[in-house]
Image: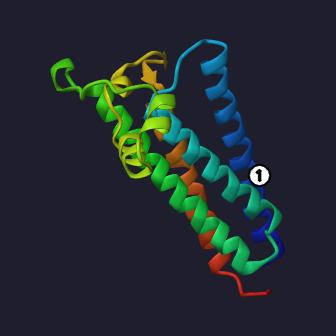
Amino acid sequence: MTSSNSQIVRWLNLAGALTCIALLASAYYFEYEMYLDPCPMCIMQRIATLMVGVGCIVGFFAYRHYLTSLLAGIWTLASSIFGFYLSDHHRWLQSLPPDQVPACGPSLEYMVEAFPLEQLITVLLRGNGNCAEVSWSFWGLSMPFWLEIFFTGFIVASVVGIFLIIRQPKNS
């Protein structure tokens, strides 16, 4: 990649990684300092945020290597789309009328111990009644809505980064 484009991609990745670190730190602050227990969809959104962060860190360090940068960008884009889907689904669950909210499920610890892996993943991706509760909001927007905004930003930044990578000649 040319020097200017590789530096732009590198700084996009650094900004993405730092944003993911801040989002995960916030999630743990809400859990351990504000005592807001995460629901299954919250846990999955944390995993998606971690996946985006890993892609950004790899992209930051591998900015001079065409294929590694491209793969990191694609990983980050896919993780961002996954996170957007989860946060959008979570927000949808929160918008349901009370009579349409799915039944609440057991705690995550119990599900990990008692459920087979396939059923656990299904519950984590689908959510349950615990996910419909809005326990925190800022400027009238719930946590999943804020994450949807962040994942949208990650998607845009990933697309820009991939575009900058692929329009450059392969150096390595």
| Colour pattern of the rendering | rainbow
- Image quarter in which the C terminus is found: bottom right
Q: Report x, y in % for residue 62.
A: 80, 69
The residue at the point 55 percent across, 64 percent down is: 159
Residue 55 in picture, x, y percent from top left: 67, 59
* Depth order, front residue of 2/87: 87
Q: In the shown orientation, is residue 52 left or right of residue 82?
A: right
101 lies above or below 114:
above
- Which residue of the protein is positioned furthest toward the left in this rendering? 99
Q: Where is residue 12 shown, x and y percent of the image?
A: 71, 55
| Residue designated by label 1 | 14
Estimate the x, y position of residue 40 in percent, counting from the top left: 45, 34
Q: Residue at x 31, y 25 (%)?
A: 129
Taking 38 as reference, is 163 above or below it? below
Front-most of residues 32 and 139: 32
Q: Quadrant of the N terminus?
A: bottom right
Quadrant hosting residue 106: top left
Residue at image location 72% in from the left, 48% down from the top: 17
Q: Nearer the viewer, residue 26 or 40?
A: 40
* Residue lying at the far top of the rendered structure: 34
Residue 82 placement, left or right of 161: left
Residue 17 higher or lower than 160, as above or below: above
Q: Using the rendered view, name the quadrant where residue 61 is placed.
A: bottom right
Crowd around label 1: few <14 · some 14–19 · many ≥20 (10 Å): some
Q: Which residue is pictured at 61% across the width and 28% down the height?
A: 27
- Kindly state the secondary structure of the residue where label 1 is placed: helix
Is residue 161 rendered to the left or right of residue 11? left
Label 1 amino acid?
Leu
Across the whole image, how many numbered discs are drawn on residues? Answer: 1
